[in-house]
Image (tube, grey):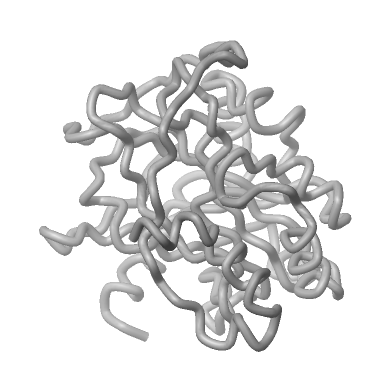
Amino acid sequence: MFPHLLLAAFYFVSLARSQSISELLDNVTQAFSKSSVVPDVLTTFTPSAFLSMTFTDAESNQQVTPTPGELLTMNQTHPEAEYFLAADNSTALESYGNLVLVIVDPDAPTPSNTSISQVMHLLAGNYTLSSSGSMLRNTSEELFRYWEPRPQAGSAPHRYVLLAYPQPSNFDTAAANYFANIPFEDPRYNFNVSSFAEALGLGDPIAGNFFTCGPNVTATPTEVVSTSRPSSSSTTTKPQPTLTPLAGSASRYGATTAMKILGFSMAALTLL
C-alpha cells in the first residue's frame, strides 16, 4: 500500500476510534437533514455503516478527510478520493458484499438554478473491502468515471453527495441496459439516484457522506441551505465533459451505449 494510503487508513481508523460508529452515523444523518440532502437527494436516510473519503490535494499533496458538509477547494477534490467504510463489527462489514458507489451534485449549475441536477460525478460497482478491512477498492472499470467538482464562477457552493448501495448480482448488465434505454443524450445530467436505485433494485443506501465545494473558495466548514427548483422556463448551457475513453466499453456495450456510459452524445463529440 502506498504511504499516503496508509496515512489515510490510519486517519480513518483513528476517527472511528475517537467516536463510536453510532456517533458518526448520528452526525452524518443530522448533516443530511440540516443541509437538505434529505429530501433533495433522498427521501430518507438511515445508514448502517459510516462512509468516509480522503482526498489528496493535487498542489500541496496534503490529505483531507472532510467532515459531513465541509467546504473544500477545487484543488482539494482532484484527483479522486479514497473511500473507507466502518461498521460496528467486521462481520457486519463483510455481510455487505460488493457495493455500488455514486456521487451526485444536486446543485447544478447553481443552487438557485438546479435545472440540470442531479449531475452524476461517479457511478461504479464492484467495490469491496481491502485487506486492511476499511478501504474500499473497485475491482472493475467504472460505469462513469469520477468528475472532479468544477462549479461555475459566481455560484454558491454545491453539495457533492456520496452514497453506497448493496450491489445485486446482475448490476453490470442491468446498469448497461438502464443507460442504453434512457432518452437523455447526456446521462450524467438530470440523473436521479433514487430512481436509478429503484429501477435496479439496489434498495436504500447503507452509508453516505457529503462535502461542499465552490469556485475559488477557501476551505472551511459550512452549512448549505437548500433552494427550490427553478421553473421549467429556466435555461442553462450544459458544460461539456472531458473525453476519457473507457477501455473495452464499445465492445462490451456497443458503440452507442458506450458513448452514453462515458457521458457523451454524438452532438457533443462534434463540438470537442
Residue 172 image-quadrant placement: bottom right
Viewer-proximal residue among 71 and 153: 153
Q: Position of residue 156 (x, y in %)?
A: 33, 22
Q: What is the quadrant of residue 237 in the picture?
A: top left
Near-viewer residue (249 or 219): 249
Provide residue 68's location: percent of width, then percent of height. 46, 36
Q: Is residue 42 left or right of residue 112?
A: right
Q: Nearer the viewer, residue 143 or 138?
A: 143
**Side of 13 where 232 appears, left or right:** right
- Is the residue 155 above or below the residue 55 in the image? above
* Image coords of residue 70 (percent x, y): 36, 34
Q: Quadrant of the N terminus?
A: bottom left
At 34% from the left and 74% from the top, the residue drawn is 5
Between 224 and 13, the one nearer to me in the picture: 224
Q: Is residue 67 left or right of residue 73?
A: right
Report the residue at 73% width, 50% height from top. 206
- Picture quarter containing residue 155? top left
Residue 86 percent location from the top left of the image: 60, 59
